[in-house]
Image (cartoon, grey):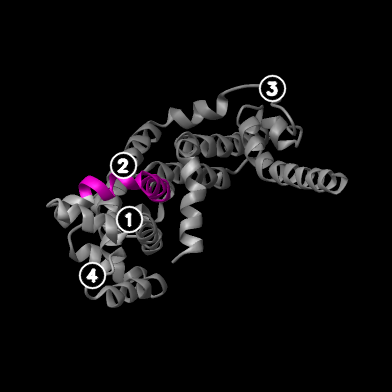
Amino acid sequence: MTSDAIFDTVILIVLTLVFIVVAYPLYFVIISSFSDPKAVAGGQVVWYPIGFNLRGYAEVFKNSQVVTGFINSLIYTTCGTLLNLAVTLPTAYALSRSDFNGNRFVSIFYLVTMFVSGGMIPTYLVVKGCGMLNTIWALIVPGALGVYNMIVARTFFKANLPNELLEAAKLDGCSSTRFFFSIALPLSSSIIAILVLYYGIGHWNSYFSALLYLSDQKKYPLQLVLRSILVLNEAQLQQGTATTAEQLAQQERQRQLIELMKYSLIIVSSIPVMIVYPLVQKHFVKGVMIGSVKG
C-alpha cells in the first residue's frame, strides 16, 4: 500500500507539473489580452490581468475585415469539412472491405501520396488550369482527402464492421450502398467526430492556401486577415520616423498596442476550436488509438 501511495503521489505531481507547463502559456495569452499594454510590455503580467481593458479586442474588431474573415472561415471550414467527409468515408469503407478487388494497389497508391507530392508550383498550375483561382474550391478541393485520416477511418471500419454484419444485411436484401449509408455510417459516429475535428481544425487554421490562391481581400479567411493586420501594423511602425520626444512616445505606445493585439488575435482565432474540441474530446483519444494500434 505504501509503495502504491508513493507511486500515485509521484505520478500526480508529474502530471500536475506537465499540466502547468502546457496550460500556463494559454492562460498567459488570455490574461495578457485583457491587460494594459504597458504592463504586458513591462513583464508585470504573470498570474492575473493588470489594468483590465478591452482595447486589444476593440482594435481588432475595429477592422471590418475581421468579421468578414470570420464568416469566410466558417464557410470554408464547413464546406471543406463536408467535402472531406464525403470523400474520405466512402474511400475508407471501400478499402476496409476484404472483397474489394485492387485493394492493395489502391492502398499503396494513396500511401505514396503521403510522402511524394507534386510541389507548390505544379499544384498552383493545376489549380489555375482548373479555373479555381480566387474561388472557394481552390481552398477545399486540393486537400479533399487526407491519407492519414483515411487510414484511421479504414482501420475503424475494419475493427467495428465485421464481414458477418454485411453478410447478414445482404441476406435481408440490403445492397452495399444501403449498408454503407444505413448501417455503417450510423455505427461510425466516433470516427466521424474525429474526422470533423481533424479536418475542421486544419481548415480553420489554414492561411497559406488562401495566400497563394486568393487575390480578392473580401474572400480572405480569418487567419489571413489577422496576419495582414499584424504585417500592416508592423510595416507602418517600422516606416515611422520619430524625431521628437512626443513622437517617440507615440511610437512606443503604438508598439505596445501591436503586442497587445497579437494576444487578442490569438484568442479570437482560437475561440471556435476551444468550443468544438470539448464536444469531441471523448472521441479524440479513441480515434488516435485506432490509428496507432492497428493500421
Separation of residues labelled 1 and 4 (CA atoms)? 15 Å
- The answer to whether residue 246 is visible is no
Q: Give the extent of the magenta segment.
A: 181-199
Separation of residues labelled 2 and 1 (CA atoms)? 28 Å
Up-down relation of residue 125 to residue 245 (above or below): below
Q: Residues within 10 Å of mark 2 (few under 14, many from 20)?
A: some
Q: Residues within 10 Å of mark 1 (few under 14, many from 20)?
A: some
Does the magenta run of residues contain 191? yes
Amino acid on which the number 4 mark rests in the picture:
Phe
Q: Are marks 4 and 2 in contact (CB under 8 Å)?
A: no
Separation of residues labelled 4 and 2 (CA atoms)? 31 Å
Mark linked to residue 78: 2
Q: Secondary structure at mark 1?
A: loop
Give the left or right position of residue 281, taking residue 96 as reference. Answer: right
Question: Who is closer to the viewer here, 163 or 223?
Answer: 163
- Residue 183, given in percent of the width and then of the height, sits at 25, 47
Seen from this angle, which residue lies furthest top?
A: 52
Mark linked to residue 161: 1
Q: Are marks 3 and 2 in contact (CB under 8 Å)?
A: no
Does the magenta run of residues contain 145? no
Give the left or right position of residue 160, taking residue 31 as reference. Answer: left
Give the left or right position of residue 193, taking residue 11 as reference. Answer: left
Separation of residues labelled 3 and 1 (CA atoms)? 57 Å
Q: Nearer the viewer, mark 4 or mark 2?
A: 4
Q: Quadrant of the N terminus?
A: top right
- The answer to whether residue 69 is visible is yes
Q: Nearer the viewer, mark 3 or mark 1?
A: 1
Q: Name the residue beneath numbered marker 3.
A: 51
Amino acid on which the number 1 mark rests in the picture:
Leu
Separation of residues labelled 3 and 4 (CA atoms)? 65 Å
